[in-house]
Amino acid sequence: MLRIAVPNKGSLSGPAAEMLHEAGYQQRRESKELRIVDPTNEVEFFYLRPRDIAIYVASGQLDIGLTGRDLLIDSGADAEEILALGFARSTFRYAGKPGTISGLADLAGKTVATSYEGIVAAHLADNGIDASVVHLDGAVETAIQLGVAQVIADVVETGTSLRNAGLEVVGEPIMQSEAVVIRRTGADGDDPKVQQFLRRLQGVLVARTYVMMDYDCRVEQLEKAVALTPGLESPTVSPLHNEGWVAVRAMVPAKEAQRIMDDLYDIGARAILTTAIHACRL
């Protein structure tokens, strides 16, 4: 039975459970449940603190886990990313008082406060910067005001929190994070149970990214239409009862669907429909 770690709370928990549900896996009904068994799919889920998941997976007690790339790197655990999941995206940046720091080199000799000591220490070392790192659990914006540090490193989305604290972003991003699937470094990459699990999640990712588009088109406009909707391999084309017309079906990127529909209409395509994809295998 495949043993999988899932975030039990925080910004990763809800989207992770939703994706697993879309992939056909049973999920817990109560937030207090720490373990459930899905006998149909031969999977056992363990609901753990997101920060601990990489450590459990690295120990070999669990086969794979869903966590954040930031938490994986920060843990220093002997585990590796095997699939990016496209949610819980975040950017890590340095920040300080305006005018005090202009770039990464200015961090030398400074103290940096952060909740992600592992990430920051590694980034500083990789860039040859000799600086001290202080670990704080949340609300790092106040560290500079209280004299604990001269610089902070934290998740930056809109930058509003930093500006409200009288700080500004410094230098390039430390890293880009998102939810990922991880496994122990060196684990069997051909494990059929793991591969099946990954295929299901990849199917969800594709289903969320694409829609199925159907339309009718005159034969003389077919090449132009196919150029607009090439599909993954090629579109399905079927003759219609009315001579000179064909029906076309293809997967298209969901974010481009409206533009493609307009372009198809302009070349004479009609009865243009889009349908959501709930699951797939490619």
Image: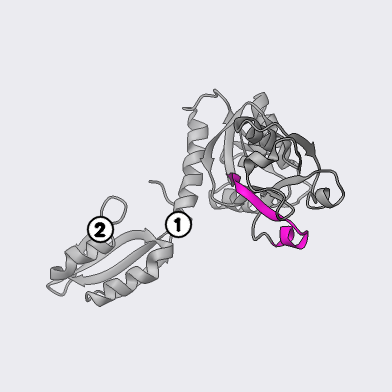
The amino acid on which the numbered mark 2 sits, given as a three-letter code, is Thr
Q: Residue drawn at (66%, 49%), measured in percent from left and top? A: 12
The answer to whether residue 146 shows anywhere in this view is yes
Q: Name the residue under label 2.
A: 236
Residue 34 in the figure: left or right of residue 210:
right
Question: Residue 255 location, x and y as percent?
Answer: 43, 64
Q: Nearest the camera: 121 or 98?
A: 98
State the quadrant of the N terminus. Answer: top right
Say whether disc 2 or disc 1 marks the residue closer to the N-terminus. 1
- As for residue 248 lying within the magenta part, the answer is no
Residue 170 within the magenta-colored segment of the rendering: yes
Q: Is residue 182 left or right of residue 275?
A: right
Q: Please state which of the two labelled residues, at mark 2 or mark 1, is closer to the viewer.
A: 1
User: In x, y percent, where is residue 57?
Assistant: 65, 30
Front position in the image: 209 or 107: 107
Where 228 falls versus 52 (above or below)? below
Which residue occupies the extreme right position in the image?
146
Q: Identify which amino acid the numbered label 1 is placed on.
A: Thr
Q: In the image, what residue occupies the spot 78% across and 59% down?
A: 165
Q: Quadrant of residue 7?
A: top right
**Which mark is on residue 209?**
1
Q: Can residue 68 be seen at all in this image of the molecule? A: no
Q: Give the range drawn in magenta.
A: 160-176
Q: Residue 2 carries which label?
A: none
